[in-house]
Image (cartoon, rainbow, N blue to C red):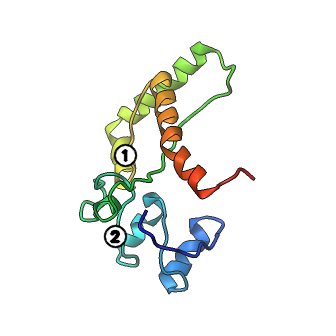
Amino acid sequence: MAGVDLLTVHYRGAGPALPELMSGRAQVMFDPVASSIAYIRAGKLRALGVTTATRIEALPDIPPIGDFVPGFEASGWDGIGAPAHTMPDRISILNNEVNAALADPTFRSRLSDLGTEPFASSPGEFGKFISAYIKMWRPVIETAGIKAE
């Protein structure tokens, strides 16, 4: 979207990549906030932008990349799933327990401090979220010619 051509260097996760970035052997990295926020706060990394549509609570002074590249948004998310044929009563129990944990102020505060923005939902709402996410990324994947390995 920005017309920038970056050389991609694959690492086996943030663990080996972050020292490369901090030493200057890599110049830029897209990384989940949770794995880099301590280095940002300690002044060892300089955050240039967040990939979410809006600023995040944990790094309120860091602008969204969308402020400079209109329409850019590329946030990741985590969710909990179960095998397709899991009994509905078990899905309900799991959903209720996860939502209860996400409602706990101490747990929510810790997640927020790591730069995540937790949200509770129902299995149906989560399914709609996943469908919308797939719809949003399909054109990008097709345009880039990305294929499953």
Q: Position of residue 96 (x, y in %)?
A: 46, 23
Residue found at x 35% / y 49%: 112
Amino acid type at image mark 2 = Arg
**Residue that label 1 marks:** 117
Rendered view: 98 above or below 146: above
User: Which numbered disc, 1 or 2, marks the residue that appears first in the sequence?
Assistant: 2
Rendered view: 147 above or below 9: above
Q: Nearer the viewer, residue 54 or 46?
A: 54
Element on which disc 1 rests: loop
The residue mark sitting in front, 1 or 2, is: 1
**Residue that label 2 marks:** 41
Residue farthest left in this picture:
61
Amino acid type at image mark 1 = Glu
Q: Nearer the viewer, residue 34 or 147?
A: 147
Q: Position of residue 148 (x, y in %)?
A: 71, 50
- The part of the image, by quadrant, that contains residue 59 is bottom left
From the viewer's perspective, tell me whether residue 115 is left or right of residue 76: left
In the picture, the quarter occupied by the N terminus is: bottom left
Q: Nearer the viewer, residue 97 or 8?
A: 8
Rendered view: 65 above or below 21: above
What is the crowding at mark 2: few (fewer than 14 residues within 10 Å), some, or many (at least 20)?
few
From the viewer's perspective, tell me whether residue 59 is left or right of residue 75: left
